[in-house]
Image: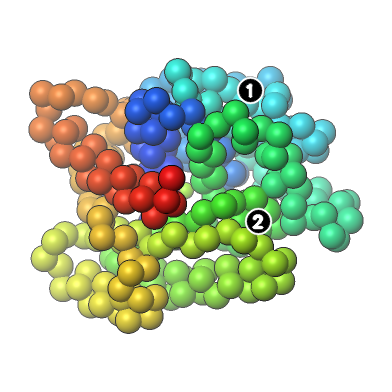
Amino acid sequence: MNVGKTTISVITADHLSRSGKKVLLIDLDPQTSATLFLENNYGEITPKEELFTALNNENLRPAICHLAENLDVIPGDWNLSKWDQMAAKFPQKLRMFILGNLLQPIKEKYDYVILDVPPTISVLVTNAVLASDYIALVLQTQKSSYESALRTTRYLQELKEDYNANFILIGIILYLVSKRSRTDNIIESKAAETFGEEALFKNHIYYRERVKNWSNQGITHNEKDIHDVHTHKMYSDLIEELIERIGD
Ligand SMILES: Nc1ncnc2c1ncn2[C@@H]1O[C@H](COP(=O)(O)OP(=O)(O)O)[C@@H](O)[C@H]1O
Ligand SMILES: [Mg+2]
């Protein structure tokens, strides 16, 4: 579901790298939305080798593009939609750990590696989950993605058991319509009941026209523009809580 995942991933990568942390953002969505978002700011992003090829050759380095000080990206690749088929050639035992294993030697160079995943579960998404230390879910009240969040937490729990995985679900981010919306409040209390009050991020994401501008024209940091300032503050509060929840 479109719940603002890519937007949060890209803005988080932007904020953390600007604050001096070394960040690698990996766009695992064949629709390449994170890459398209970043291209507004950085122009066309062309890796030496596309991600699908890099995964096939079992070396991710040629897929990494350097965008700015502290910010690298592995751009998305529409060929990824065929990746599940490709993964089938790996022995069963290894199949879900291909990405994790390839990231092992690379992640040491970074403070944060952010994986932006497509909305449907696949071998690739399972690889991403099992490669992760921490996972955040996003729930958009307007689209009542509540059911989907519920299914996702069950799927994560199953993966944990089946693969003895040790990723931590750090919480659920709510994308709300407005501070006073009735549907928002209903879904929020339903989510608090199901997942537990403490599972929900205290900082929420709200609909902001400015985010639309950013996703079409690139992120701006104009300190004299109140919409830039407020929208960045909304995300930086969320990111601060995210870092707190990770416990770094
Ligand atoms: N806080 C926000 N305010 C307004 N529009 C948003 C916000 N967050 C995301 N969007 C828009 O919603 C659409 C889906 O967002 P996206 O981050 O791509 O979701 P997902 O990755 O979950 O599919 C995009 O057009 C994006 O610009
Ligand atoms: Mg997305």
Q: Nearer the viewer, residue 111 or 124?
A: 111
172 left or right, relative to 70: left
Callout 2–callout 1 Cβ contact below 8 Å:
no
Does 193 appear above or below 198?
below
Q: Residue at 66% of width from left, 32% of height from top?
A: 106
Q: Is mark 2 within 8 Å of ligand 2?
A: no
Q: Say what amino acid the circle numbered 2 marks.
A: Leu
Q: Residue at 68% of width from left, 20% of height from top?
A: 48
Say if residue 224 shows up in the picture: yes
Where, by quadrant of the figure, is residue 9 drawn? top left
Question: Is tag 2's residue or tag 1's residue first in the polypeptide sequence?
Answer: 1
Callout 1: 10 Å neighbours few (<14), some, many (20+)? some
Kindly state the secondary structure of the residue where label 1 is placed: loop
> Percent from the top left, x then y, of residue 41?
38, 23
Kindly state the secondary structure of the residue where label 2 is placed: helix
Question: Residue 47: which disc?
Answer: 1
Where, by quadrant of the figure, is residue 161 drawn? bottom right
Q: Residue at 30% of width from left, 73% of height from top?
A: 197
> Percent from the top left, x then y, of residue 72?
53, 26
> Percent from the top left, x then y, of residue 182?
16, 73
Q: Nearer the viewer, residue 22 or 52?
A: 22
- The residue singled out by tag 2 in the image is 130
> Percent from the top left, x then y, of residue 43?
46, 19
Say if residue 216 shows up in the picture: no
Count up the numbered dots: 2
Q: Say what amino acid the circle numbered 1 marks.
A: Pro
